[in-house]
Amino acid sequence: MGIVAVTGVDGSGKTTVARLAAHYLASRGVPVRVVWVKSLHTLAYLVYRLFRAAWGVEHVVNPRGIVVEHYVTRYMARMRGLWGLIEYLSLLPHLLKVWLLSSLGFAVICDRFIPDFLATVSLRVGDELWWARSLIGRHLLALQGRQRCALLDAEPRVVLARRPDAEYTRGELAKLIAIYRAVARQVGAQIIQATHPPSLIAAEILKLLGRA
């Protein structure tokens, strides 16, 4: 039936839009699944928990003045390529799930997918071009290039209004948004303003699936 990735910084509205599009399809008898590919999943999350237990929790003050747990830690940047490999191994089961569902005839709407992985890992390892320079990044770009994708593009003020507890510093948030945009251009994603009404964005997602 097809796969579409809905990507964007947390707070851009991915989950709302994915659910709206899935509800529309289900109401018309189309087999559909929403797959949430969370950040820091499986192996990467276990490694993160081990480091947190050993070295304590890192906190930062975000742009709204809220103290939040920091998931862009110093040791991730020190590990660089090794951390990227850990996150890549953690991503593989999710990729297999998406392609298995698609092969079984489901329309698959991904709430976060390869572009989100590339953007967040690039930020964590401290290399804004990791997504383009690493072997893992280039491999995943090739995979994503075969799938339809929409970036919900949100400015920092929009993200912070929707997610006042965002777990980034002001500089990190700006970098993350810039990386998302660069990855989106590279994979030919449709770029949609996150401030558009969710129903209109969902309609664009359905068009990408050929189901509008």
Image: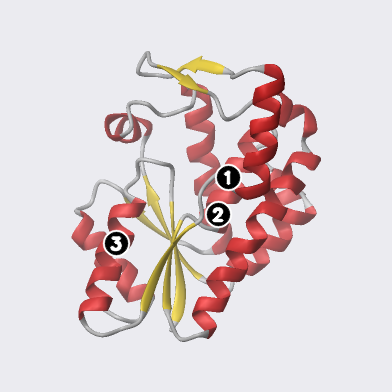
Provide residue 64's location: percent of width, then percent of height: 35, 18
Provide residue 154's location: percent of width, then percent of height: 36, 42
Q: State the residue position of label 2.
A: 115
Answer few, some or many: residues within 10 Å of disc 1's Cα (few below 14, many 20 plus, some between 14 and 19). Answer: many
Q: Earlier in the sequence, mark 1 or mark 3?
A: 3
Residue nearest the observer in this picture, 1 or 170: 1
- Is residue 17 shown left or right of residue 68? left
Task: Quarter of the image for the N terminus: give it.
Answer: bottom left
Q: Residue at x 50, y 85 (%)?
A: 104
Query: Disc 2 to disc 3, how far (Cα)?
Result: 19 Å
Tags 2 and 3 touching, CB below 8 Å: no
Query: Is 159 drawn above or below residue 52 in the view shown?
Result: below
Q: How many marks?
A: 3
Residue nearest the observer in this picture, 56 or 130: 56
Answer few, some or many: residues within 10 Å of disc 3's Cα (few below 14, many 20 plus, some between 14 and 19). Answer: some
Provide residue 101's location: percent of width, then percent of height: 50, 77
Query: Is 76 drawn above or below residue 130 in the view shown?
Result: above
Answer few, some or many: residues within 10 Å of disc 2's Cα (few below 14, many 20 plus, some between 14 and 19). Answer: many
Identity, as a three-letter code, of the amino acid under mark 3: Arg
Q: State the residue position of label 1.
A: 119
Q: Residue at x 22, y 73 (%)?
A: 24
Q: State the residue position of label 3.
A: 19
Query: Disc 2 to disc 1, how far (Cα)?
Result: 6 Å
> Considering the numbered disc 3 on the image, is that residue within a helix, a strand or a loop?
helix
> Considering the numbered disc 1 on the image, is that residue within a helix, a strand or a loop?
helix
Q: Residue at x 39, y 71 (%)?
A: 33
Tags 2 and 1 touching, CB below 8 Å: yes
